[in-house]
Image: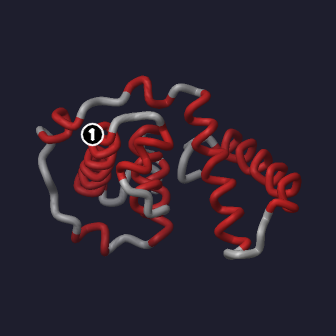
């Protein structure tokens, strides 16, 4: 749900991820944690779906993001984790993917760009715009629509 906002699509991605986990279990070397290995499979499944559906076709350049006003982050610290996850789920797909990869998964913008076949500036732009969108939703509605 962090990468796609449609519950049915997320279930399909989860199912495909489990199929890949079970069919690839022999390739797990055991050098790292099983959880991390599985997480990478599920993230890659979600990213593969986003690539197949051409999520990046509507990405905008970082110059557009620079014109958006910057808000403080203190409101986020007042939110519960569930409220924040709900709000992140409402981000447009390009914003949500980069935000999750950078903030949650810990990828660098260079790694995100290589993984998604976009430029580093697009990755930065999507991240900045995601933060600004989240801040605006928090400012306007308290914790976002439906959260």
Name the side, left or right, on which 77 lies relative to 32: left
Say if 34 sits above or below 6 in the image. below
Is residue 93 left or right of 123 when viewed as pictured? right
In the image, residue 107 lies at what x, y percent? 44, 58
Residue 127, given in percent of the width and then of the height, sits at: 32, 48
Q: Is residue 31 above or below residue 105?
A: below
Q: Residue at x 67, y 54 (%)?
A: 42
**Towards the viewer: 37 or 102:** 37
Left or right placement of residue 15 versus residue 105 in this view: right
In this view, 97 is above or below 76:
above
Disc 1 target residue: 121
Q: Is residue 11 left or right of residue 95?
A: right
Residue at figure coordinates x 49%, y 50% from the top left: 89
Q: Secondary structure at mark 1?
A: helix
User: Is 72 in front, or is 146?
Assistant: 72
The residue carrying pointer 1 sits among few (fewer than 14), some (14 to 19) or many (20 or more) residues within 10 Å by Cα, namely some
Q: Residue at x 83, y 55 (%)?
A: 24
Q: Quadrant of residue 18?
A: bottom right
């Amino acid at each position: 749900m962090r990468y796609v906002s449609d519950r049915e699509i997320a279930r399909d991605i989860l199912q495909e991820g489990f199929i890949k986990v079970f069919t690839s279990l022999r390739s797990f070397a055991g050098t790292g944690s099983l959880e991390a290995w599985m997480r990478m499979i599920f993230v890659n499944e979600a990213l593969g779906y986003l690539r197949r559906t051409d999520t990046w076709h509507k990405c905008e350049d970082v110059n557009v993001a620079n014109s958006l006003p910057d808000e403080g982050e203190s409101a986020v610290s007042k939110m519960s984790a569930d409220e924040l996850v709900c709000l992140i789920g409402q981000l447009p797909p390009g914003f949500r993917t980069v935000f999750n990869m950078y903030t949650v998964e810990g990828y660098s913008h260079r790694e995100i760009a290589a993984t998604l076949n976009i430029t580093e500036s697009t990755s930065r732009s999507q991240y900045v715009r995601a933060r600004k969108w989240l801040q605006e939703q928090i400012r306007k509605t308290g914790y976002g629509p439906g959260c």
